[in-house]
Amino acid sequence: MALINQDFRFQEKRERHPYLRWAVFAVASVVLGVVLAKTSSNSQTADSLPSFKEVKPSKDEIVRLSFELTLPELQAKQKIIDELNQESVKQWQELKVKSGDSLARLFKRAGFSSQQLDEVMKSGDAAKKLTKIFPDDIFRVLTDDNGQLQALRYEIDPETYLMVEREYGELVAKEYKHTIETRVAHAEGEIDSSLFLAANEAGISESIIMELAGIFGWDIDFALDIRKGDGFKLLYEEVFRNGEKIKDGEILAAEFVNDGEVYRAVRYTNPETNRTEYYSPEGKSLRKEFLRTPVNFTRISSRFTNKRYHPVLKKWRSHKGVDYAAKRGTPIRAAGDGKVTFKGKKGGYGRVVMIQHGSRYTTVYAHLNSYNKKIRVGKRVKQGQTIAYVGSSGLATGPHLHYEFRVNGVHRNPQTVRLPSSQPVPKRYMADFELTTAPVFAQLDLLTRDTQVALAESE
Ligand SMILES: [Zn+2]
């Protein structure tokens, strides 16, 4: 009889709050499971209620489920459990770790006694993980009416978490593993106005779009080159925790059609260097090379530093580039394939050329005497191509090239910055490369905008 009453109550709640439905159902199942276990001694077997037996989750599942609920959901769930057990309702709260916090400090701030802290630390080997906690970590703690700690939850890393539970009066710590899986997803899209819009329509996250733009950024300018009718296909990973997607993984392969030209990329790890990069189907790196120095110089007249004395301004200021002293008129070469983004005068820089390489890199050439007449803003340049000539325009004491190398807008030392590798797949690994990537390209081949239309029509 009691069972039936409880069942009605769940029906009611389910309607009022559909999101809680399966949490409530899970709790119901567990509670009923407990009731069944208790009543089985009264010669009633679980088989007499097969519908409940089928949905009864394992204890492990409940533990994980409860970990993933939001705090209000957890509170609601706790309330149901406590009411069913005819106990006073226990309270969950979240404690956020601040910089410099130890568990002791955190507990003290939350009003727990040192005895409670002791009890947690002695709750088992798994609790040793609590000696190292980090700012912004979140603890969830459950307390009863008397403020006594009943449970504690703590995410050790994205895959592991700690549960401390009061069992028969004593706190017991246990470590659990989430189930992490990687699945391959695919997406296709055709561009009408912008890549972002098309990617959005295809259901791709911003991080994947940025990665896609980064992969092809050496060949395609996603701000200026994109045309209506361009399209893309990609295979990428999705990471799931306990069956729920938590984030996107890496792009495995991608194709981009720009103005009728097809670009393809595949992710491959060079077995020799163990470095993972994107390659064309022929095994060429999609990144392009850089010259370490873009000019034949006589000497370096000033190095990259965050502070130096400026001889013209007679002030201390940082020098975010390298000065290569050279005869006036010495040709300056583009450090890498790219696109001219600026050509003209710019304050103390004098005459300047800026080149954008891929999506991350920019090089800057300053104090120029003159430009190569073929150089125009928006036009592509090849590595080694002469772009300008050494001079002393702007704030310069004598003819030299002031050269800057920026990565994602941040000035880096051109002499030491790690330049992107652009080596093709080594010859002796080409067989391995082809063997590894052929099935991936085959999968990519299966994705066409035509099949997508066909699928949509058949649905
Ligand atoms: Zn300089």
Image (tube, rainbow, N blue to C red):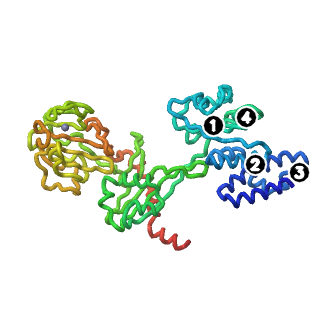
Q: Residue type at mark 3?
A: Gln
Circle on res. 41: none
Question: Which-is-in-front pick, marks 2 and 4?
Answer: 4
Q: Residue type at mark 1?
A: Leu
Q: Nearer the viewer, residue 96 or 166?
A: 96
Question: Which-is-in-front pick, marks 4 and 1?
Answer: 4
Circle on res. 146: 4
| Quadrant where ligand 1 appears | top left
Residue highlighted by disc 1: 162
> Is label 4 in a helix, a strand or a loop?
loop
Q: Residue at x 71, y 41 (%)?
A: 90
Marks 2 and 3, the one that precedes in the sequence: 2
Residue highlighted by disc 2: 30
Marks 3 and 4, the one that precedes in the sequence: 3
> Is label 3 in a helix, a strand or a loop?
loop
Q: Is residue 102 above or below residue 193?
A: above
